[in-house]
């Protein structure tokens, strides 16, 4: 059953101009299309009509690169759970529906154009400490020299599955980046390789997070609900412990 | 004319790399600070190379077109990474990994490079664990392994179905450390537009800021291209939307030979095409073939009933199913290499046994694995092994822990639950073994210009084994290039920084700007995607899983005509001074329109079948690929001469000292 839809899309030429919502009808949308394929069809139609196509970020289209970033009907990555926008399918919508599409909004994520935003603040937070200070010489000890408790390894992995999309920030009323930062802090804090410099890491990353203008965490948990990878709030609790410990340790 | 000296070191195979490292020139730490290196691309190869070169002391400039280096498409690699650790004690060794890779590549890769790859594979795992990459572990706390196609040991390390993500984040973290120190200058949302040569040497690039549209000049003492593969020449592939050949193609136009363009991997287990709107295809990891069994119905009546929705695959009795891989290849069964599995799926579907509406799908079934694991779990927990409901639930939990993210991805796309009903899969373009020709030092035929990772051609021959792409990317970036590049740069310690206000940069920039204006001023009828889709259809129909002389000749003619129409009739909206994705895409598709023709020419020239390259004229009576070692034991390296049809073939003969070249059999 093909669907006809009305799209209300945020259009903004660049970071310094004002934006506005613009309405576009779209017909014959297949329920098997992904949301971005529907956007491709819209853009093809706009180009053929001589209208500037809608800019949006996307790359892998399989939910792992973290580049797509649409705020659809008031939810980061739209109404489905545990998916990115590229994995959201049109079968989640009904014929005749009006769909509102906005960029991920936060002071720390300025709009590049239309639905594309600048998330380089996330990169800068990681420059401040998102690594283990080990040279890539290959002259490290054998990988099996340090056994790691499977439960810790699995939790570290779960934290490490964060794709850095920014849905947590976009969903938070304070535009806080705590879920993102805590996922990275947790991954390393849970592994013996990362423990060595855990104190400096958490202090430096939190400082950079604050400098970037992200808001405070007030434990409403919207980030966890909207996270496409199901990153747990436990990570925030762990980061708070790490941070407290680090400040006490000085 | 550039020569094709592969520069393979002398001496016994197993000592070549060690000896070579000990004898090449080095650059002192103080002098490294005087040398700039550009790295284009931040996937596993580019990110690991950037981090390591910066750690060594060079000044690195890294470029990626994505908004962050962490998004490069290595992130999407699922199944795992090979290493000859022999942690399982199942008879693995450096030699066996080397041998499997050469055989898997159907004896069309360079022996010395592959041996080096196998040698450094173990370092990769040590390195990644030290960086905090959370590989899968067993309850004893040690690293776990699984098995991949074309091998008889378990040497694949993994992190659920997200191994590429974890390895790339590891390499990205190493980059972050150097970006923080100021040793890497990172250029996100930048595209390499051309290579700049000065006195025949690579001395910089022209790049474009994709947000502002500004064209920029960047000088360096060496340029490393790590821009991945060119599978998107088929339009539909498992590659990311932005993956492109342009960096590789630009250096080809400037004198780098392009090797074996027709060696493309069609991956057997991808989610089938659902309609004309399709923008990309999604891979279901090869690791699933550890536990999934591939089949189609034996009887054509059952096929019809399934397609009509009158019969569910789960209702079909065991004796009515054709597990065709197990039937044809009993030794390797469902874990035959990718090229073999893909052709076997095509054979069944061409014979009319495809199980979906388009007739292009086969089943990948986990029911047997779920029961096997469920019984094992019931036994371990002291529960009733004959309780079918309990066994199924326990088995599903095990399968979820191994492949949960893949099953979820499948369910979201297809809207069916693969824990309850078999997955439907079909082959799709996935990886390109061909690429820029490089010598043993990974240098292209342009002095000072290197190609690493999927962008080069060297290690996988005519078919890549599963879990070897990640291995090669990280081997090149962490452990090979950082040594070999010093040998070249040792001559550059007194050169001083490379000026960009020179006639060479002027000319290169002008050519780039002219090309951009050409696209914007064309104001034709059709969008860039219109051309990309048309090219993809020609490629898939005539240069896909099965090729013949007639079709390849037609492809060359069709692609040339399409390219000419593209330059006359393309419609690129917007301007050059804004974020303009269509403009960026126009440049990429223009290069695909040249590469596609060379691809067909290469496939036409190679009249043998080998690996992923199947020429219908060269097959055994049973339909297996038939190599022609007497006439084709060489690398086809093409020299650019303007029109792709005019490219000149240079041959690098492949000499096997250690390995006896045999018919490749998985029966």
Image (cartoon, rainbow, N blue to C red):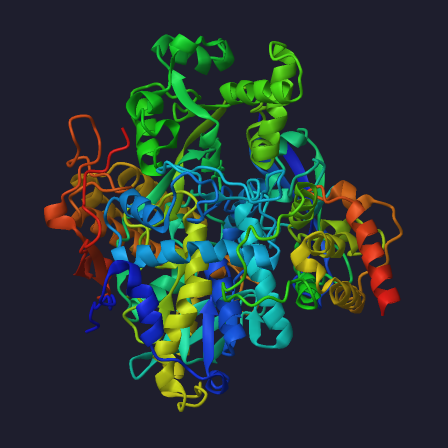
- The residue lying toward the viewer, choosing from B443 and B30, is B30
- Residue at horizontal 56 percent and vertical 70 percent from the top: B187
Q: Residue furthest left?
A: B630
Left or right: B151 in relation to A200: left
Residue in view at x 63 percent, y 26 percent:
B397
Give how far across and how far down residue B242 sits, in percent.
Answer: 49, 54
**x and y percent of residue B29 in the render?**
49, 83
Q: Determine whether B61 is above or below B595 in the image.
A: below
* Quarter residue A211 falls in: bottom right
**Residue at coordinates 31% horizontally, 69% vertically from top-left?**
B19
Let me know if residue B103 appears in the view. yes
Q: Quadrant of the N terminus of chain B?
A: bottom left
Quarter of the picture holding the C terminus of chain B: top left
Q: Give the number of marks.
A: 0
Residue B350 makes an appearance in the image: no
- Image height check: is B639 above or below B557? below
How far across and down, in percent of the image, does residue A151 sit?
Answer: 69, 41
Q: Is residue A215 left or right of residue B20?
A: right
Q: Is residue A63 left or right of residue B335?
A: right
Q: Quarter of the image holding residue B400?
A: top right
Q: Nearer the viewer, residue B367 or B300?
A: B367
Q: Position of residue A181 (x, y in %)?
A: 74, 57
- B223 relative to B397 in the view: left or right: left
Residue B342 occupies quadrant: top left
Say if B39 sits above or below B622 in the image.
Answer: below
- Decide which of B45, B602 is in the foreground and name it: B45
């Amino acid at each position: 059953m093909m669907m006809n839809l009305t799209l209300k899309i945020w259009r903004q030429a660049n970071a310094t101009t004002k934006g506005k919502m613009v309405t576009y009808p779209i017909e014959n949308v297949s329920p098997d299309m992904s949301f971005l394929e529907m956007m491709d069809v819209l853009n093809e139609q706009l180009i053929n009509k001589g209208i500037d196509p809608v800019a949006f970020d996307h790359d892998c289209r399989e939910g792992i690169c973290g580049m797509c970033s649409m705020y659809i009907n008031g939810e980061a990555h739209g109404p489905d759970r545990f998916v990115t926008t590229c994995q959201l399918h049109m079968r989640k919508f009904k014929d005749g529906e009006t769909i509102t599409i906005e960029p991920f909004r936060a002071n720390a994520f300025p709009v590049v154009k239309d639905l594309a935003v600048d998330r380089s603040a996330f990169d800068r937070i990681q420059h401040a400490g998102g690594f283990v200070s080990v040279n890539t010489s290959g002259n490290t000890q054998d990988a099996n020299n340090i056994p790691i408790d499977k439960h810790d390894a699995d939790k570290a992995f779960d934290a490490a599955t964060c794709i850095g999309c920014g849905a947590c920030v976009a969903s938070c009323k304070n535009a806080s980046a705590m879920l993102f930062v805590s996922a990275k802090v947790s991954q390393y804090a849970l592994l013996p390789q990362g423990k060595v410099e855990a104190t400096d890491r958490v202090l430096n990353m939190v400082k950079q997070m604050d400098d970037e203008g992200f808001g405070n965490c007030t434990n409403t948990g919207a980030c966890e609900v909207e996270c496409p990878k199901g990153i747990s709030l436990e990570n925030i609790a762990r980061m708070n412990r790490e941070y407290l410990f680090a400040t006490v340790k000085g | 004319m550039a020569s094709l000296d592969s520069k393979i070191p002398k001496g016994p195979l197993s000592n070549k790399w060690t000896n070579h490292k000990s004898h090449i020139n080095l650059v002192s730490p103080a002098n490294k600070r005087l040398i700039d290196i550009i790295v284009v691309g931040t996937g596993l190869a580019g990110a690991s190379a950037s981090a390591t070169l910066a750690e060594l002391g060079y000044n690195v400039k890294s470029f990626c077109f994505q908004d962050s280096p962490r998004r490069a498409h290595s992130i999407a690699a699922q199944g795992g990474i090979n290493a000859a650790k022999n942690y399982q004690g199942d008879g693995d060794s450096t030699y066996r990994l080397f041998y499997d890779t050469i055989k898997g590549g159907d004896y069309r890769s360079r022996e010395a490079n592959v041996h080096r790859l196998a040698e450094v594979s173990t370092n990769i795992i040590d390195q990644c664990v030290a960086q905090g990459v959370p590989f899968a572990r067993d309850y004893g706390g040690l690293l776990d392994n699984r098995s991949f196609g074309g091998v008889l040991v378990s040497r694949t390390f993994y992190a659920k179905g997200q191994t590429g993500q974890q390895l790339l984040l590891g390499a990205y973290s190493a980059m972050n450390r150097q970006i923080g120190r100021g040793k890497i200058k990172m250029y996100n949302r930048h595209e390499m537009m051309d290579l700049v040569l000065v006195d025949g040497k690579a001395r910089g690039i022209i790049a474009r800021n994709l947000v502002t549209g500004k064209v920029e000049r960047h000088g360096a003492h060496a340029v490393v291209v790590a821009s991945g593969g060119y599978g998107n020449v088929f339009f539909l592939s498992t590659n990311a939307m932005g993956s492109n050949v342009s960096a590789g193609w630009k250096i080809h136009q400037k004198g780098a030979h392009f090797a074996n363009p027709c060696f493309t991997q069609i991956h057997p287990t991808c989610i089938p095409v659902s309609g004309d709107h399709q923008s990309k295809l999604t891979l279901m990891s090869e690791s699933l073939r550890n536990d999934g069994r591939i089949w189609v119905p034996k009887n054509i009546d059952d096929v019809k009933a399934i397609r009509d929705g009158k019969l569910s695959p789960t209702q079909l009795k065991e004796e009515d199913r054709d597990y065709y891989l197990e039937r044809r290849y009993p030794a390797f069964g469902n874990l035959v290499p990718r090229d073999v599995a893909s052709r076997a799926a095509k054979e069944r579907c061409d014979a009319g046994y495809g199980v979906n509406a388009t007739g292009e799908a086969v089943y990948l079934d986990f029911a047997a694995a779920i029961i096997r694991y469920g019984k094992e779990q019931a036994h371990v927990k002291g529960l009733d092994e004959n309780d079918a409901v309990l066994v199924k639930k326990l088995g599903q939990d095990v399968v979820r822990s191994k492949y949960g993210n893949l099953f979820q991805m499948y369910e979201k796309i297809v809207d069916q639950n693969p824990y309850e009903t078999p997955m439907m899969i079909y082959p799709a373009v996935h990886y390109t073994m061909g690429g820029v020709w490089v010598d043993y030092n990974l240098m292209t035929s342009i002095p000072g210009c290197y190609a690493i990772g999927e962008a080069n051609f060297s290690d996988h021959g005519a078919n890549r084994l599963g879990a070897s792409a990640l291995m090669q990317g990280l081997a090149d970036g962490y452990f090979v290039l950082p040594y070999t590049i010093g040998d070249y740069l040792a001559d550059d310690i007194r050169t001083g920084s490379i000026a960009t206000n020179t006639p060479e940069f002027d000319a290169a920039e002008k050519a780039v700007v002219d090309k951009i204006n050409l696209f914007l001023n064309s104001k034709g009828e059709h969008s860039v995607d219109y051309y990309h889709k048309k090219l993809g259809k020609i490629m898939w129909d005539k240069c896909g899983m099965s090729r013949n002389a007639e079709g390849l000749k037609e492809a060359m003619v069709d692609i040339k005509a399409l390219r000419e129409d593209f330059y006359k009739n393309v419609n690129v909206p917007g301007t050059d001074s804004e974020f303009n994705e269509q403009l960026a895409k126009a440049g990429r598709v223009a290069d695909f329109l040249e590469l596609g023709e060379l691809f067909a020419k290469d496939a036409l020239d190679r009249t043998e079948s080998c690996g992923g390259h199947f020429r219908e004229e060269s097959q055994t009576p049973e339909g297996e690929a038939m190599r022609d070692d007497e006439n084709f034991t060489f690398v086809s390296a093409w020299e650019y001469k303007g029109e792709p049809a005019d490219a000149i073939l240079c041959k690098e003969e492949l000499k096997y000292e250690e390995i006896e070249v045999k018919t490749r059999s998985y029966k």
